Image: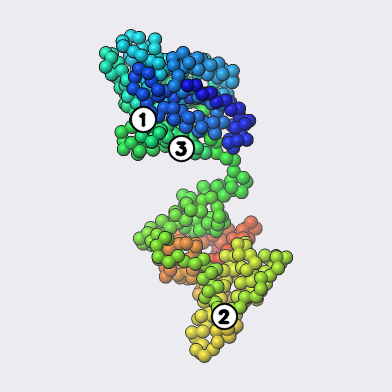
Amino acid sequence: MRHIFRLWAALLVLCFGVNAALAETRLALIVGNGSYSAVTQLDNPVHDAELMAKALTSKGFEVTVLTDVGQGALNRGIAQFGRDLRAAGKDATGLFYYAGHAVQSFGENYLLPVDASLTDAADLSLVAVQAEAVLRQMRSAQNKTNIVILDACRNNPFEAIRDLNDNGLAEMKAPTGTFLSYSTAPGAVALDGLDGNSPFTKALAVQINTAGLPIEQTFKRTRVQVIQETNGRQTPWDTSSLTGEFFFEAKAQLTAEELQEKQLWDSVKTSEDPVQLMLFLRSYPAGRYQEEARVQLTAMMEKELGTAPAASPDSGTKEAPETEVIAAATPTVQAPAPQPPSVSEDELIGAAQSSGSAVDYQAYLDVFPQGTYAELAAFELKIIKEKAERAAVAQSTTQAPAETAAVVPATPAVVDLSGLTFETPFPTGGAPIQGLSIAEIVQLAPMFPPIEGIPEELWKDQSCSNCHEWTYAALCDQGTTYTKDNNVRALSKAHPFGGVFKQGLRAWATGKCK
């Protein structure tokens, strides 16, 4: 049976979303032989050919598929493949894939058509197709990239014939610009598979879909997957003489914002300073590297504090989001009806900062729950709640909670801290920073987790100097970041010691960190 699929690159772009950057022509000849007439039949090669055709078509290849073909049809298919490749030009990529029986004789590899019948080893070249014929067609095209994939060596169907009792295939030399891949090492036997596909082709079809992965890494990952699935009984092998990079699927181009995020991540991911990771997490709260950064930060803090890994987040009671905790803990504050959408974020947060009122901060969160200043508003609400609770304990037990909340003084939005030095006490800011210097404050425990989701044992009742490299120089660097015009948003983010402390760091850095 012969199936031929031809899909042009323009149609591929529309139907399969192939990266538009794939400008070169990609041609593939795929052969799957399983229904042999004179030797052991194989269950999976046709399925393997179909799976590989689907995978390559989605990556922009114009695919020709031959299944269960005899010697004449196989030779004609290889010859036509060579003509197509020569016509495509030097920038074209050619790929040949074969699944089925193959044998070696005197160091040469032969692909077996389904009509191959043999009683004497001397007749092998008369009934089979030499694998070198494919390489000759590719070499004649003089194109820049060629790929040969042989998922053969299931077993030797001619073991009983003298001089044909070698297992597996012989190693072939890859002409310049060629990548050769075998489903198993030279001289070894590959498995046909028990679930409709061979372990090798099934793994390769998965790895081809990884965007931005060079071909060498694609086949390395395939090798690892096959070794794991076969419990070490099969080890794919490859050799390369490629002179340029090849990707089955090129990595998508980053936007300017994504590129900026990547550059910042590349600059901090090897840092041993948790502060740098925290600043990155706050700068890109929904970024591409959030999970990796959080894992790295948690591991770093565990190492610094010598604590065991936190329990799985699925165990126990799930914590409510910060804003929900705050809202539940301040039942005496009656929030007004949500402001109309015409009110801007800046106007609402400005009003809340001017009044210092929990009502105004809650009003901002009601209208902009995911707004730019949502984290700041939630933090200020928590501080107001904690101050109210401390005031309630200190005053008469008969005093109404609403009255207690009413006497909480407003925290100024912006305070004058000019002239602040490393040893100068903060003149304002409330507990716990007021009256203490920067040098003293960093020895305190944080008032809330520095990053949402960090296990409590890593921050609660811990000295911040233990979980950060808060040296004099590091603090100066942190303060300097707050002095830059493009870091206004960073100043609005909540801090374990409150916004006034960040303003103090900025004032100290403005004075050259004296």
- Seen in the picture, residue 118 relative to 371 is either above or below; the reply is above
Residue type (three-letter) at the residue carrying disc 2? Thr
Q: Which mark is residue 332?
A: 2
Which residue sits at x=52%, y=83%? 391
Residue 240 seen from this side: no
Give the alpha-carbon distance from disc 3 to disc 1, as whole Å. 18 Å
Q: Which mark is residue 206?
A: 3
* CB within 8 Å, label 2 to label 3: no
Give the alpha-carbon distance from disc 2 to disc 1, as whole Å. 71 Å
Going from N to C along the chain, the mark reached first, 2 or 1, is 1
Q: Residues within 10 Å of mark 3 (few under 14, many from 20)?
A: some
- Seen in the picture, residue 22 relative to 356 is either above or below; the reply is above
* Quarter occupied by the C terminus: bottom right
Dot 3 falls on a residue whose secondary structure is helix
2 or 3: mark nearer the eye: 3
Residue type (three-letter) at the residue carrying disc 1? Asp
Towards the viewer: 325 or 472: 325
Residue 221: x percent and y percent? Answer: 42, 37
Residue 271 seen from this side: yes
Residue 117: x percent and y percent? Answer: 36, 14
Dot 2 falls on a residue whose secondary structure is loop
Going from N to C along the chain, the mark reached first, 2 or 3, is 3
Residue type (three-letter) at the residue carrying disc 3? Val
Dot 1 falls on a residue whose secondary structure is loop
